[in-house]
Image (tube, rainbow, N blue to C red):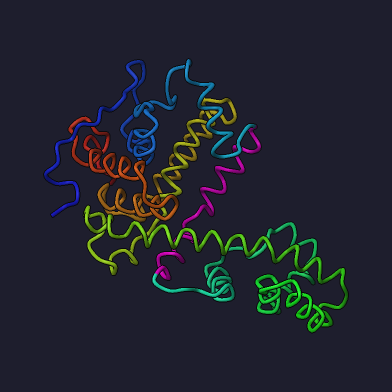
Amino acid sequence: MPFWSKREAKSPYRYNSKAALSRERQRAMSVGAILLQSNNDFHNSLESGEAASLKERKQSLVDWWGVSSPAEAIDTLDWLKNEGHRKHFDIVLKTYQHDLSLEDFMRMREEASISLFDDNISKAHPEAADLVKKHIGILSSIIYASSDEEADSLIEKHKSLFGDDEMLNLCFSIFVPMTYKFHDYAKHRNNLQQTLPKLLSRGFVTSEAELKRIDVTVWDMGRMVNVARWCYDSGYITESMAWEYIFAAYKESARCYADWAAFGKAYTVGRVIWIGDNERQDAMMDIVRDLLEHEQSPWRQILLK
């Protein structure tokens, strides 16, 4: 039985009475429908809402995305388009039942073509970057030593591998941010573990085997539509640029998913990994179900493909 069956749809949908989109643009815009509905934005115009709420949308760009200029807008949109969270979340889906070591996590990131280091750092200090890759186990044992005394002992034992203190310190400056990525992975894995019973009970996944096959690309694509609209509203990108990003999100979504139901499932899993289980997660699940059922939903007006 589909996970949206036998439920009375109740969510209203806001449509801009002063605007109309072509069928192609409406289909592409609907890739962002989950967030549009969550934010109470218009579903049928590039403008997200009334001019009176523009200040709030601009502040949301700052608070949620760190975007307050055209350059930051393009950097963020390009990141969602080309990288986002999808490869990282794919590692979470593949390994959430296991405890990965930092070394295994970094190996899987490298296999997934995710940059291990900030590109500027690795380009500026290639020798240090190579040493970090080569001695990641040693650096890890020092960082996670049980006491300062143990850490000092390990440094003394292995510092000759790094040449001198300056190179060792540089290696640590590259390595420590990598540990933050590992901590994020552990948090996201825990989010999925804790919320999996709800995903199963509400029918968003039918089994753990199905969960591991889900492609969470939509988590980035849905957000890209939302960010593109707010950046356009804020004057950071042009209308043509906004549509370029929105159609890129649609093209990738149509490549990955057979229909809106598969799309909605995947977005829900992506959001579970990001935020875990809370009341807002329940509301988001309700939004997805209503989008698939309510007669005024944009997903009921136009098929994904």
Q: Quadrant of residue 40?
A: top left
Inspect the magenta stretch and tell me whether residue 84 lies in it.
yes
Residue 101, above or below 115:
below
Q: Residue at x 79, y 75 (%)?
A: 152
Magenta range is: 69-96
Q: Is residue 296 left or right of residue 89?
A: left
- Of the pair 140 and 41, the residue shown nearer to us: 140
Could you tell me what secondary structure mostly forms the magenta stretch?
Answer: helix
Q: Quadrant of residue 217?
A: bottom left
Q: Quadrant of residue 116?
A: bottom right
- Of the pair 122 and 211, the residue shown nearer to us: 211
Q: Residue at x 63, y 64 (%)?
A: 179
Quarter occupied by the N terminus: bottom left
Inspect the magenta stretch and tell me whether residue 192 lies in it.
no
Residue 297, above or below 124:
above
Q: Is residue 81 left or right of residue 191?
A: right
